[in-house]
Image (cartoon, rainbow, N blue to C red):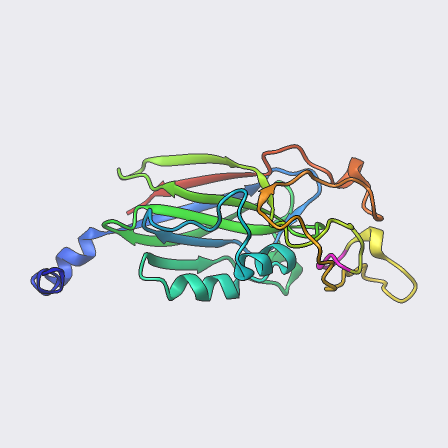
Amino acid sequence: MSAVLACLVSPSEAQQAQRRYEVSVTNITMNQRFTPVLVVTHSSDIALFQLGMPASPELARLAEEGDVMPLSQLLTGNPEVFQVMNSPAPPPASNLVAPGQTVRVMINSRGGFDRVSAAAMLIPTNDAFFAVNSVELPRLMGEQVVVMAPAYDSGTERNDETCASIPGPGFPECVTATNAGGDGGGARAGNGEGFVHISSGMHGTGPFRPAARDWRNPVARVVIRRVQ
């Protein structure tokens, strides 16, 4: 029946049924950067994660490496997903979202795809990420929803806070004679807690000083506004 009804809807009516949203993510940390931001519109039947449960391998890639593509591809193939969009990836490093900066992502939805989720890695961390997890989209034109998003830990890496296991460019703490740019490495620390939980922040077990790199939740201000 649904397939027949879909054929009876004119293109103009289908276009009117589609809604467009601006998702603005502001980094409100003192000294963490966000990697590219994944934004997805979907039904209420899915979520990016459940607290207290293991992270998917695709979410782990986002949280450990800032790589949004595996999770984007997984979501794109899900019939409960309407659209997946990502903010620009580096290089250049300016495509990282610095403290106090805002990135905006435009995304569409329709009908029962009435939820939005978003996520990005915090660097320098082992596997911390901010997320908006299955928030209801505003329905009225011009209406907006504001979410103060905490940092989560994917629980897939121990937080050794070393340059070797934290990816990303330009960390002063990682500058050496052979690493003038202070770039982090991509080694997997492993031995994480095994479940997604609220991040406990930076503790100074490596070269990153908590006074400079730690945070107090929330870490992102996310504004979801209907624009069409």
Give how far across and how far down residue 194 sits, in percent. Answer: 62, 50
Q: Residue at x 86, y 57 (%)?
A: 175
Q: Which residues are magenta?
A: 165-170
Q: Is residue 76 left or right of residue 174?
A: left
- Left or right of 119 on screen, residue 12: left
- Main SS class of the magenta portion in the image: loop
Position of residue 120 measured from the top left corner of the image (x, y, whole percent): 56, 51
- Determine whether 208 is above or below 60 in the image: above
Instruction: Report the residue that reaches farthest toward the right.
Output: 177
* Position of residue 22 measured from the top left corner of the image (x, y, whole percent): 39, 47
Can you give x and y, in whole percent of width and height, for residue 97 in the image? Answer: 60, 50
For residue 8, which quarter of the picture? Answer: bottom left
Picture quarter with the N terminus: bottom left
Residue 61, placed above or below residue 130: below
Specify whether residue 8 is painted magenta.
no
Q: How many marks overall?
A: 0
Specify the farthest residue to the top: 216
